[in-house]
């Protein structure tokens, strides 16, 4: 763990719930993090973390993004996850990335620290029960709805464990999405085609301006190539697709880069998922506090409002712009990856 942890994300501080030390992953992290210079401290509960420094929203956010909290997952209730899977589950929450538009800006509180759960066997047992209930139908599980699981994989190894679990599962299937590229530890696993990896891609403009602390476009494409060579079913999530001056040229460049590096004939069942940019009122407020100079276009006057549950609606592009984005992406895909499937545009 030593070398890898230094090369990738290294937390500045780690907090441990006492119960986490009853699990082998908890004990390993407790022993090894101090070895690589990460101070550790015990806390009463992973939901009550009070020691993260930061008096203003920017510092609080930055410091939390460098804080890891090691705990035990108690609630085993799984949420449904449409449109990409039947259920979502998490072995970690929060993310080491710092994307301005990220949905985690509003779901993780003022200090969005990264929580990792050490009771992975219990989490997988629970998944198994859900699979058995629906058998012989296949049940799909999304692992990346409240974190980017590749981000902390060099610390936990939990994704590897999940891939191994799903490889042996007759009716369970795993879906992962990431903006990171350190996937080498996953390449030799016997995944049995039961895990679909999707890399989240975007134009260089979007990555450069809004996706801080994530892998570059080239790194993601290189990682995707390795994942395809390892025989994993592969997909791409283009999200959030943005409509800005020059977007067509930028997205075309992205598709050209992708085509140059990937041999479509070597990829099994290539899929694309297309998600247009959207924001909520609550997100806009938090984003402007944390990134006062962001170039994100959050002008409600140029958007349409879509009502949501409990009054939590969101701002989307007008139908004409959304249709333009949808048609452009589909034609690029059709041209460059004619055998690929577009699963949805939303
Ligand atoms: S990598 Fe994904 S989960 Fe992490 S901050 Fe960016 S959008 Fe959010």
Image (spheres, grey):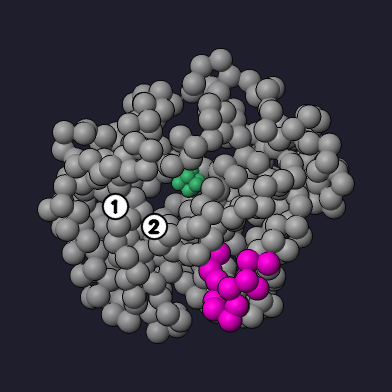
The secondary structure type at the circle numbered 2 is: strand
Q: CA distance from mark 1 to mark 2?
A: 13 Å
- For image coordinates 23% across by 40% down, the residue present is 305
Badge 2 crowding class, 10 Å Cα cut-off, few under 14, some 14 to 19, many 20 or more, is many
Reading the chain from its start, which is encountered first: label 1 or label 2? 2
- Residue at disc 2, CB closer than 8 Å to ligand 1: no
Magenta span of residues: 129-141
Is 285 in the magenta? Answer: no
**Residue at (34% x, 50% y) in the render:** 240
Say if 54 sits above or below 272 in the image. Answer: above
Q: Residue 77's x, y, as percent? A: 62, 52
What residue is disc 1 on?
A: 276
- The part of the image, by quadrant, that contains residue 62 is top right
In the rendering, at what x and y percent does residue 76 appear?
Answer: 67, 52
94 or 231: nearer the eye?
Answer: 94
Q: Label for residue 201?
A: 2
């Amino acid at each position: 763990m030593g070398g890898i942890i230094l090369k990738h994300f290294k937390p500045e501080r780690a907090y441990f719930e006492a119960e986490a030390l009853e699990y082998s992953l908890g004990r390993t992290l407790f022993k090894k993090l101090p070895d690589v210079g990460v101070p550790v401290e015990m806390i009463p509960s992973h939901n009550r973390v009070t020691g993260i420094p930061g008096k203003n929203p920017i510092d609080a956010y930055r410091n939390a993004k460098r804080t890891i909290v090691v705990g035990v997952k108690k609630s085993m209730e799984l949420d449904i996850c449409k449109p990409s899977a039947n259920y979502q589950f998490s072995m970690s929450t929060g993310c080491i990335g710092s994307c301005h538009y990220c949905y985690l800006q509003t779901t993780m509180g003022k200090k969005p620290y990264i929580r990792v759960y050490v009771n992975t066997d219990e989490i997988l047992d629970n998944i198994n029960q859900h699979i058995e209930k629906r058998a012989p139908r296949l049940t799909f599980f999304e692992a990346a709805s409240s974190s980017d699981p590749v981000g902390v994989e060099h610390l936990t190894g939990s994704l590897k464990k999940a891939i191994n679990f799903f490889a042996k599962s007759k009716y369970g299937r795993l879906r992962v999405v990431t903006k990171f590229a350190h996937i080498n530890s996953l390449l030799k696993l016997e995944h049995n085609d039961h895990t679909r990896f999707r890399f989240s891609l975007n134009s260089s403009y979007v990555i450069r301006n809004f996706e801080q602390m994530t892998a570059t476009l080239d790194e993601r494409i290189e990682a995707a190539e390795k994942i395809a060579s390892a025989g994993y079913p592969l997909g791409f999530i283009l999200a959030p697709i943005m409509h800005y001056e020059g977007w067509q040229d930028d997205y075309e460049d992205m598709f050209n880069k992708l085509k140059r590096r990937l041999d479509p004939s070597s990829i099994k069942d290539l899929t694309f998922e297309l998600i247009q940019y959207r924001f909520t009122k609550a997100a806009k407020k938090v984003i402007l506090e944390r990134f006062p100079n962001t170039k994100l276009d959050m002008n409600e006057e140029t958007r349409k409002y879509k009502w949501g549950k409990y009054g939590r609606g969101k701002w989307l592009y007008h139908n004409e712009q959304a249709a333009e984005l949808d048609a452009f992406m589909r034609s690029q895909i059709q041209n460059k990856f004619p055998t690929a499937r577009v699963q949805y545009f939303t």
